[in-house]
Image (tube, rainbow, N blue to C red):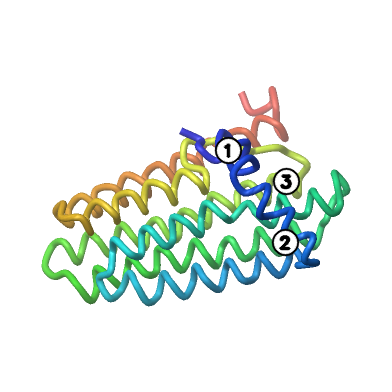
Amino acid sequence: MVLGNRGRGFSSTVFGPLARLLVRWRVSPDAVTVAGTVAVVAASLTLLPNGYLVAGALVLGVLVLTDSIDGIMAREVHGDTPRPYGEFLDSTLDRFSDGAIFAGLTLFFVLRTDGATRTWGVAAAVGCLALGGLVSYARAKAQALDVVAKVGIAERADRLIVALVATLLVGLGLPEAVLVAALGLLALASLWTVGQRMRVVRHALVGERAR
């Protein structure tokens, strides 16, 4: 998996012209970051809970694909110069976006399903919400300790793609159990990724003494 790493070249090619246009219009990369987050949160908490799964998946898919525009803009303006606040803002608001998507799916199960589908759907969606945040936290904490822990089978892009594709398929007519199963597997993959990152950090900080 790890689709996020492989998609950066694609994003730069597709969205580079738009990013450069926004730079010429003197739009701030941080403003694009904030606007994108507001759009994701609004779409997640209106479309998904109301059962508009196809529209929600498509709109959110487009917004997720365009998430790299602010980064391209920053490189156009600042080159390779580090932008600590911009990186902090982008990473922090990504957590808002991810949380809104899985919160929207949680509300969908609460409001639009019943019985075992509701029970397991809510559990899987909440699991994705909590464990996805833990995946990001593990990487950030490792970075604070000067350890690179960018490993795992469920990075952010992977989690969002799986969740949105499953949402789209259910919206197109597949059983809701498909979404429950996809989210359940995604939660397990996130947990496994946390374990992988913990192992990398332990090896880096303890080394041979851990064996």
Q: Quadrant of residue 122?
A: bottom left
- Disc number at residue 208? none
User: Regarding mark 2 in the picture, which secondary structure is present there?
Assistant: helix
The amino acid type of the residue labelled 3 equals Gln
**Left or right: residue 178 compared with residue 16:** left
Q: CA distance from mark 3 to mark 1?
A: 26 Å
| Crowding near the residue tagged with mark 1, few <14, some 14–19, many ≥20 C-alpha atoms within 10 Å | few
Q: CA distance from mark 1 to mark 2?
A: 19 Å
The residue beneath circle 2 is 22
- Disc number at residue 10? 1
- Disc number at residue 143? 3
Q: Is residue 148 above or below residue 159?
A: above
Q: Quadrant of residue 128?
A: bottom left
User: Regarding mark 3 in the picture, which secondary structure is present there?
Assistant: helix
- Residue 50: percent from left, percent from top: 27, 76
> At 19% from the left edge and 72% from the top edge, which residue is drawn?
112
- Residue 150: percent from left, percent from top: 62, 38
